[in-house]
Amino acid sequence: MTWILILAIAAVPAGFYTYWLRRDWWFLDPINTFWPLYLMFGVLESATGLEDWRDSYGASLVDHVLLLYFVAGLCVCFGYARPLGRGLGRRLPVAKGVDEPHRFLLLGYATLALGLLAQLYIIREAGGMEKFLAVARGSVDYSRISVFTLTLIGFIPVGLLIILCTTYADGRYVFLRRAALAATALYGAWSVYAGTRSGLILTATILFGAVYGAGRRNPSLLVITGALAAIVVGVGFTTVSRGRFVGGSYNRELAVTDALDESLNWYKGSEGGDVVLGSEFGMSMAAVRYVGDEVPYDAGYMMLELFTRQIPRAIWPDKIYPEGKAWDTLHRAAGTARTVNAAGYLSGPAPGLIGKWYYMFGVPGVILGGIWTGIFLRMLQTYVRRYEGVSGAILAVGLFMFGFSEMNNPFGWVFGWLPTTGIGVFLVVLLGRKGAITPWVSAAPYGLPDDESQVGAG
C-alpha cells in the first residue's frame, strides 16, 4: 500500500502537466516551482527513509501522511483549474504605460551599484579582499553588519536581472548583454565558493528569466533537463564543499567522479543527520502524530504573525511570535528540532504545506490549503501574463519562487519577499515604464483573451 501511495503522489504532477502542457504552460509560471518540492517531500524523502519512518511512527501513520500528500496534490490541481484564480489575477491593478529600455538600464545600473557598494563594505569589514577570500563562510562577523547592508547585498542579482532582461528584450545591446552574462556567471561562481545554495539557484533563475522571459518563450525539454541536473548537482556540491574553499581555491584534491558522488550523496540524508530531524516530510509526520493528541490544533492562531512580525521590537519590546511559539510547542513534543532561535523558540525544518495546514485545521485544513494554493498560484500566473517585455520578465522571475514558498512554508513569502524584494520589484516595474502618469490601473495594458492557449507558446 505504501509504494502505491508514493507512486500515486508522483502521478499527480505528471497528470497536471499532461493536461497543461497541451493548453497553457510557460516555464516561468510559479506553479513550476511547487511540484519539484512536492515530489521531493512526498516521494524522495518518504521513499529514501521509509524504514526509518516506519520504525519511528509506524506503517499506518506513514500511509496516512502519504495519503494526505496525494489528496493535497489533487486539491492544488483542482484549485488551479478553478476560474477564481484567473478572475482575481485580472482584478489586480497593473502599472500603466509601456516599457522604456533606457529607464530599466539606469535602474539596473543603480541597483547593481548599491549592491556592489554593500559588498565592498563587507569586504572592508573582513579586513580586505585577501582575508575575505581566506575563509568563504567565516571571514565576516555578520552580527556586526546592519540588516540594511545585508539587504543591499541582494541588490546585486536584482541589478543583473534588470540589465539582462532589458538587453534580451532589445537586441541593440549586444555587448552589454555579454558583459551582464559574464557578471551573472561570476555571481554564480561566487555563490558556490561561499556555499550559498540560494545564490546558485538564483543565478539559474536569472539566466532563464532573461533568456526566456522577455520573449515569453519556453526552453526545450533537453535544456530544462540539463539545467535541472546541473542545479541538483550544483546544490549538492555547494553544500558538501562548505569550508573547503580557502584562499581562493578548492582546498581538497578530489576527482570529478568523487565530487559528483559526494554531491548526490547529500540528498540521501538530512542535514540533521537523523531522518526524523532536519526533514520536511518529518514535520508532516510529526504534525499528524502529535497534533490533536498531545498538541492542540492551532486553529489559525499562528497566522497572527503575519501582522506581529512586521512591528519593530523598538516599538513593541515584548513582541509575540505566534507562529514561532506554535512550532516550538510541536518541536518539544516531537523532538524535531534542537536549535534555539533569537526569540528563544526551538527552530527546525520548514513545516511544508501538509504539516502547517494540518497543524492549524487537521485534514479539512489540508484540503482547503491545497485548494487555496492552486487558486493563489493561478492568480499569480494570470497577473504576470498581463505584462509583456521587460516588465513581464522581471515580474515573472520575481514571483517564480512562490510555488516553492507555498509548498515549503505557506504564507512565508509575506515575511521574506513582500517587505523587501516585492516592493523593489514593483517599484522597478513602475519606474521603468514610460507614461505612468496614473501609476496603477485596473485594466490590463495588453488584452487578455478568454482563451490563453497561445500565451507562452514557442
Image: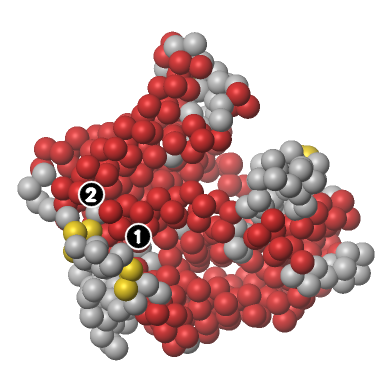
Give the quadrant of residue 98.
Answer: bottom left
Residue 333: x percent and y percent?
Answer: 88, 55
Quadrant containing the N terminus in the rendered view: bottom right
Name which residue lies at 42% across and 60% down. Answer: 399
Residue 154 place in picture, x, y as percent: 43, 39
For mark 1, give the secondary structure. Answer: helix
Tell me the CA gap for discs 1 and 2: 13 Å
Residue 101 location, x and y as percent? 16, 52
Which class describes the residues within 10 Å of circle 2: few (<14), some (14-19), or many (20+)?
A: many
* Front residue of this view, candidates 407 and 13: 407
- Using the rendered view, name the quadrant where residue 23 is placed: bottom left
Reading the image, the residue beneath label 1 is: 395
Name, please, the residue furthest toward the right: 294
> Of 200 and 313, which appears nearest the observer?
313
Q: Nearer the viewer, residue 436 or 58?
A: 436
- Amino acid bearing label 1: Leu
Q: Indicate whether 84 appears above or below 279.
A: below
- Badge 2 element: helix
Q: Which residue is mark 2?
A: 104
